[in-house]
Amino acid sequence: MDLTIAVTPDFIDLRTRADFLELCGDDSGAGRLRTLSLQIAREVDLICYAYQLLWRAKLDDAIEILEVAAAAHPDSWNVRHSLGEAYEALGDDYSATMNFRLAAALTEDEGSLALIETSLARVNRFQVA
């Protein structure tokens, strides 16, 4: 009886393997797996991973992942809102504001718009009209 199961690697699996290869000194292998992970990533994978990076204070890496997500999912208000939050964490209020505004233009959902408005108010609280 064959008990092997064919498992197709997912985004997180490939990212974890890439991190391991990098720790072992195989930067080339790590790079290949990271590239592959981006090719198969779903929108939710990219957003969740970017927030993990944000929580670990890897702001530039988070922004890079979210820029990839924005290019892959140009109609997603959620990606743009997440990108706005990443730029806000970086202290780039201009880029945060631009992404929050793009997010608002991509949705008509009242709950989402309320969240976006709260984010805009937060980054613009010190700006003079």
Image (spheres, rainbow, N blue to C red):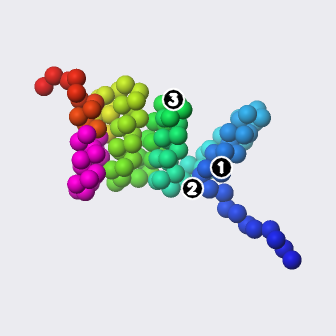
Mark found first going from the N terminus, 3 or 2: 2
View extreme (bottom): residue: 1
Image-quadrant location for residue 9 = bottom right
Check contact, mark 3 vs mark 1: CB within 8 A: no
Q: Hey, what amino acid is under mark 2?
A: Ile
Mark found first going from the N terminus, 3 or 1: 1
For residue 23, above or below residue 66: above
**CA–CA distance in space, label 2 to label 1:** 10 Å
For residue 20, above or below residue 105: above
Q: Position of residue 117 (x, y in %)?
A: 23, 42
Residue at image location 35% in from the left, 26% down from the top: 92
Q: Position of residue 104 (x, y in %)?
A: 25, 47
Residue at image location 40% in from the left, 30% down from the top: 89
Mark found first going from the N terminus, 2 or 1: 1
Magenta segment includes 2 = no
Check contact, mark 2 vs mark 1: CB within 8 A: yes
How many numbered circles does the render carry? 3
Between disc 3 and disc 1, the foreground one is 3
Tell whether 108 sits left or right of 96. left
Magenta range is 100-118
Please say whether residue 28 is visible from this viewpoint: no
Residue 14's disc is 1
- Provide the secondary structure element on which disc 2 rests: helix
Majority SS type along the magenta span: helix
**CA–CA distance in space, label 3 to label 1:** 21 Å
Q: Hey, what amino acid is under mark 3?
A: Ala
Magenta segment includes 106 = yes
Residue at image location 48% in from the left, 31% down from the top: 59
Q: Label 2, on which residue?
A: 40
The answer to which of 29 and 49 lies nearer the viewer is: 49
Could you classify mark 3 by the number of other residues whose Cα lies within 10 Å: few (under 14), some (14-19), or many (20 or more)? few
Q: Hey, what amino acid is under mark 1?
A: Leu
